[in-house]
Amino acid sequence: MQFTATKEDGSQVSYRDGKRWLWFTGHLFVLVPILTFLLYFVLEKNPAVVLIPFLFVFAFIPFMDWIVGEDPHNPPEDVVPAMSADKFYDQVAYSHIPLHYIMFIATVWFVGTQDLPVWAIIMLLLGVGTLNGNAINLGHELGHKTDKLNRFMAKMALGVVGYGHFTVEHNRGHHVHVSTPEDCASGRMGESVYAFALRELPGAFKGGWAHEAKRLRNKGLPLFHWENEILQVYALTTVIALALVAWVGWAVLPFIIAHHFISWYGLTQVNYIEHYGLLRQKRENGKYEPCQPHHSWNTNHIVSNLTQIHLQRHSDHHANPMRPYQALRNFPDLPRLPSGYPGCLALAAIPPLWFKTMDPKVMTWAKGDITRVNVCPKAKERLCQRYGQTENAATA
């Protein structure tokens, strides 16, 4: 499809989105587990095949990112209004949602009906749970829109894994406090992903409920009301879980709970890498400077960006949160991750390797001044000594 627009000087600009049909690449997330289950039966129930979803996320996609490389291209700004108004891109996001339900239900059935060793169940949890974490990403994209249909579809996406408080906290909390010590969803330099999870998971839960309670209170409604957007998602997730238990048996309930937790943790890992160490500076009036593209780590790796509908162009997203995924831009001189998100998640899982890779990048971004870095309080003294300063670093 060609997008056309008229420039201020009267000339015409035409643009064809080469990624238009490639956005369906995210459907691979569903096909991989389904093909894994089929292969399991073809190979006479060999449990080793359940490693495939895990290896797909943490080995195959990073490898393809390395092979295919990056795409720094931006659509012409003149055609962005036409691209943003094209409902095709919303429909791409919608099309992913039922497939995530299929993947989840098929996995629960598979675990509940097959005699799998414990290690195989754990690996399946890590693989499929992480893949279904992308349902939260769909809820993220759609939850930034203001119309009723997209808000409804965001809740449907979040219902896959029961992350009902995400949109509330993300829009009203994270986007307000991002890249500051006040934000539970911004990683601090010297903080491992595991320490971050202990801060972010409960912090997001509490923040989401606090924001929703305030919204309902302003409408004169009690917290436990049918208009509570968090409870709406929780109700959907609960109904699906109970239906699966009734179908497959109570033995699958621990798996369902663990699956949802892994999906939540998948988002936590992404939050950790997206703003690691980056800090917005406080002005003289005590308020933080507005969020700019350089307050988020960016990556243009093609394969992982296609599977995650441009989530990795996170710099433009935070500077312009209402800009749709198909129109997110790359900018020069942005802080850049060494790989797409899957590769960075694997790196973050080994904190010494993550620190060795990312801490020098943070210091380069801060021009060698650690007081301009969002530093973990427990690591402040060690990092100040390492980087040659004794002043108080920015901490909570």
Image (cartoon, rainbow, N blue to C red):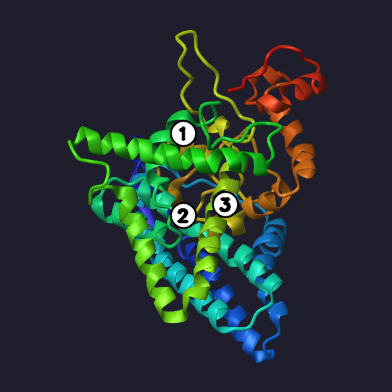
Name the residue: 52% across, 74% down: 251
**What's the mark number on residue 136?**
2
| Separation of residues labelled 2 and 3 (CA atoms) | 11 Å
Q: Amino acid at mark 3?
A: Tyr
* Image quadrant assignment for residue 298: top right
Task: Please identify the quadrant where the C terminus is shown.
Answer: top right
| Separation of residues labelled 2 and 1 (CA atoms) | 20 Å
Identify residue for label 3: 265
Q: Total label count? A: 3
Kindly give the residue lying farthest to the top in the view shown: 284
| Separation of residues labelled 3 and 1 (CA atoms) | 25 Å
Q: Nearer the viewer, mark 2 or mark 3?
A: 3
N-terminal label among 2 and 3: 2
User: Would residue 85 be seen by someone viewing this image from the given angle?
Assistant: no
Front-lying residue, 83 or 98: 98
Q: Amino acid at mark 2?
A: Ile
What is the secondary structure assignment of the residue under circle 2? helix
What is the secondary structure assignment of the residue under circle 1? helix
Query: Whole-percent x and y of residue 317?
Result: 47, 40
Would residue 94 appear left or right of 262 to someone viewing this image?
A: left
**What's the mark number on residue 311?**
none
Task: Please identify the quadrant where the N terminus is shown.
Answer: bottom left
**What's the mark number on residue 319?**
1
Name the residue: 27% across, 36% down: 215
Would residue 10 appear left or right of 361 to someone viewing this image?
A: left
Query: Whole-percent x and y of residue 321?
Result: 41, 39
